[in-house]
Amino acid sequence: MEVLIHLCHHKLHTLLPRALSRACRRSHHCTPQPSPSIHTPSKPVMPTPLVSRLFQPSNLREGQEAGDMTCRSQRLMLQAGLIHLSNPGCFYYLPVALRSMEKLVRLIDEEMQAIGGQKVDMPALCGAELWKRSGRWELMGKEMFRLQDRHNVDYCLGPTHEEAVTELLASQSTLSYKQLPLLLYQVTRKFRDEQKPKFGLLRGREFYMKDMYSFDVSEEAALHTYHSVCHSYRRILDRLCLKWVQVQADTGNIGGTLSHEFHLPADIGEDRLLMCGNCDFSANVETVALGQTDCPQCHTGTLTESKGIEVGHTFYLGTKYSKVFNATFTNAQNKLSVSEMGCFGLGVTRILAASIEVLSSEDSIRWPGLIAPYQVCVLPPKKGSKTNEATHMAEKLVESLENNLPNLKGEVVLDDRTQLTIGKRLKDTNRLGYPYVVVVGQKAMEEHPVFEVLCQKSGETIFLSTDGLLDLLGGVETI
């Protein structure tokens, strides 16, 4: 029997790399490269991510009371070791969650740079003088974190950066109309002194946000930029396969004359949204007359109310800030003109939590596929079982998937906790939401290997040959 297993194992090692190579060429039309010498690798070999080595401390065990955690995403993220509470409204972002957030930032970068956005990084510590000039030092009230340095100079931790970016542009005395539109954005921590932080990452005191600021030559050009950014926000949410709604919104303490919010419909949402069943009118209830039920746009439809989690907000500012800070440019007539501005916020950590909130079940995380921390988890059998030889094959499978499918580089994790049963580890993979789970069992040891594949999004379990597995995983979109 031992000899037979050895022969099957030897044959598998011969067939699997060939099959992987054929599938790679068929799926990606790439030219196979010669294998690098084992003694002189062309680039450093990255170790396979192992579940046993992932830093995912479970902060809330199954059956443990959730306390004041009133939303699904907060409980699931704590339970899975994605976040850890530091103090009210502030969290540690642990490695697995951070992988997902970095992917989301890459997606945002793609879309912002596709419309001409240029990435910057502005100080979190903002001087009070700028905020006093705009009048918002008093307007923001207790929501702003304020502090003094050793010289008794006032500062705040930036909740947003309209003043800072406008002052930056005002310092550029040689700005020409030929350089506009100018779209500057950053992805950074923001700070707001929420009176009652709740819902985990959905309403915190410290969070990550993408904020973009646009400078244009005219109102017409600024509105064109405004709608271009709104279109990019819709593309981001579409690429995440999230159901969203764009609604008219109040400009609040940001200011301006035009504003829209982007929401994910959810029962725990704190915003009340009104939508017409007869036309495309939708608005935050704050912008509609109290008690109004007829549509102000078509005048025939009835407004129905729902709730949403705000994940994005856009503003056309006009010259509200540029006039105050004298942010000008030289126009086509060689005269100074004041820039027309817009600002655009997208909640990075809020999208992360809100997507888990709306996609997951009560006990299992489901990610937007594009930002799942890892795409594939491979499970070898329990240690000491009759299929113990499959463990080595599982390790080779992980290596082959990453080497032959470029889209899965760094995206495959091996659950090496072979002291646990397959059933226990499958329960963990379901709870953590890996989009694909590949079980390497007895059938994988046959002459023509067959793998059990669980597709978490659809809930299906399918059995695939090596070629079928590669065809399936070769089509997974990653970023």
Image (tube, grey):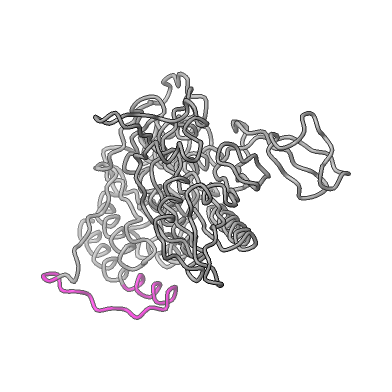
Residue at the spot x=43%, y=59% of the render? 478
Residue at the spot x=24%, y=61% of the render? 4
On the image, the x and y values in percent for residue 307 come to: 65, 34
- Whether residue 442 is in magenta: the answer is no
Position of the N terminus by quadrant: bottom left
Residue at the spot x=36%, y=49% of the render? 122
On the image, the x and y values in percent for residue 226 come to: 60, 56
Give 182 or 409, whichever is nearer the viewer. 182
Give 36 or 370, whichever is nearer the viewer. 370
- Whether residue 25 is in magenta: the answer is yes
Position of the C terminus by quadrant: bottom left
Q: Is residue 397 left or right of residue 436?
A: left
What span is colored magenta in the figure? Answer: 18-40
Is residue 17 depicted above or below 159 in this figure? below
Q: Is residue 441 visible?
A: no
Residue at the spot x=49%, y=59% of the render? 328
Q: Residue furthest left?
A: 39
Give 376 or 448, whichever is nearer the viewer. 376
Is residue 439 depicted above or below 97 in this figure? below
Q: Is residue 381 visible?
A: yes
Residue 465: name its quadrant: bottom left
